[in-house]
Image (cartoon, grey):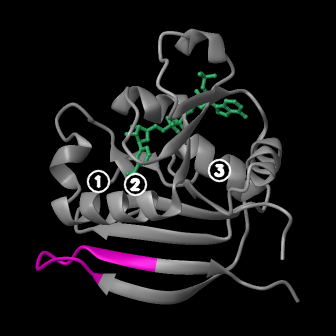
Amino acid sequence: MTNRPKVTLLAAMSIDGFIAPSDKEALPSTTWTSKEDWQFFTKQSKAIGTMILGSKTFETIKRALPERQMIIMTSEPSRYAEYSDPGLEFTSDPPAEILTKLQATGVKEVALCGGAHIYALFMQQGLVDEMALTVEPYVFGEGIKLFAGKMQQQFVLTKQEQLNEAGTLVLFYQRASEK
Ligand SMILES: NC(=O)c1ccc[n+]([C@@H]2O[C@H](COP(=O)([O-])OP(=O)(O)OC[C@H]3O[C@@H](n4cnc5c(N)ncnc54)[C@H](OP(=O)(O)O)[C@@H]3O)[C@@H](O)[C@H]2O)c1
């Protein structure tokens, strides 16, 4: 057992591994991600209770999501002084410190909600325990990749679920145990 909350990465991606197309204006996530994925994300993130996300992803939401604590990573927390909702916390702490502080308040699990910078930051530090990846039946060719930068972590597929007739899949992975 680790002395920190379990980290479960939640992401929706295209078949070719992009979390956003290059032209986000023409194809916003409300268009290419399915209603079933939004329902899945809502259910999972509420069940986990605490979300960690980057400031750029927060800028696409710009509000507190109900029944969840949102920890927003930014180098400049003061930029978000206007947000007073108690469900929102802006921090410049590094990942391990965020997790240690959450652990101290009794948090057992967090949902890592992107974007690519934040996914990579946690993955590169070996801080991702599980993933639930929604694969939407789109191909983008270019855009924002799920992970950016060099990393090597092995995962094991533990479950898969089809969410709708179009073929939206959720793939559940767990970090392979170290030998
Ligand atoms: N399909 C999906 O499931 C999904 C999920 C999430 C996001 N997205 C998409 O991904 C895109 C955003 O991803 P992104 O990679 O550009 O941005 P991001 O990961 O959401 O946020 C990056 C920002 O996080 C802050 N940050 C990064 N490292 C930090 C550190 N070590 N300490 C403190 N703050 C740190 C910096 O903010 P400051 O500049 O404020 O310092 C940085 O600019 C959006 O298009 C969004 O729609 C898709």
Q: Position of residue 2 (x, y in %)?
A: 84, 70
Q: Which numbered mark, 3 or 1, is in the foreground of this view? A: 3
Residue 82 percent coordinates (x, y): 48, 10
Which amino acid is tagged 2?
Answer: Phe
For label 1, the residue is 140
Q: Residues within 10 Å of mark 3 (few under 14, many from 20)?
A: many
> In the image, is residue 164 part of the stretch drawn in magenta?
yes
At a point 57% along the width and 10% down the height, the residue shown is: 79
Between the C-alphas of marks 2 and 1, the distance is 7 Å
- Mark 3 lies on a secondary structure that is helix
Which residue is painted at 51% across and 47% down in the image?
Answer: 114
Mark 1 falls on what kind of element? Answer: loop
Furthest residue toward left: 165
- The location of residue 23, given as percent across then percent down, is 26, 35
**Is 26 placed left or right of 69 in the picture?**
left
Q: Which disc is residue 120 wearing?
A: 3
Mark 3 sits near ligand 1, with its Cβ under 8 Å away? yes
Q: Which residue is mark 2?
A: 18
On the rendered image, what quadrant is the N terminus found in? Answer: bottom right
- Left or right side of 131 for 67: left
Give the image quarter of residue 29: top left
Magenta-drawn stretch contains 169: yes
Does any portion of residue 51 appear in the rendered image? yes
Magenta extent: 162-171
Magenta segment main secondary structure: loop
Q: Are marks 2 and 3 in contact (CB under 8 Å)?
A: no
Quadrant of residue 41 in the image?
bottom left
Please report contact status of discs 2 and 1: CB closer than 8 Å, yes or no: yes
Left or right: 26, with 46 as reference point: left
* 140 vs 67, nearest the viewer: 67
Task: Report the residue at 81% width, 50% height from top.
Answer: 104
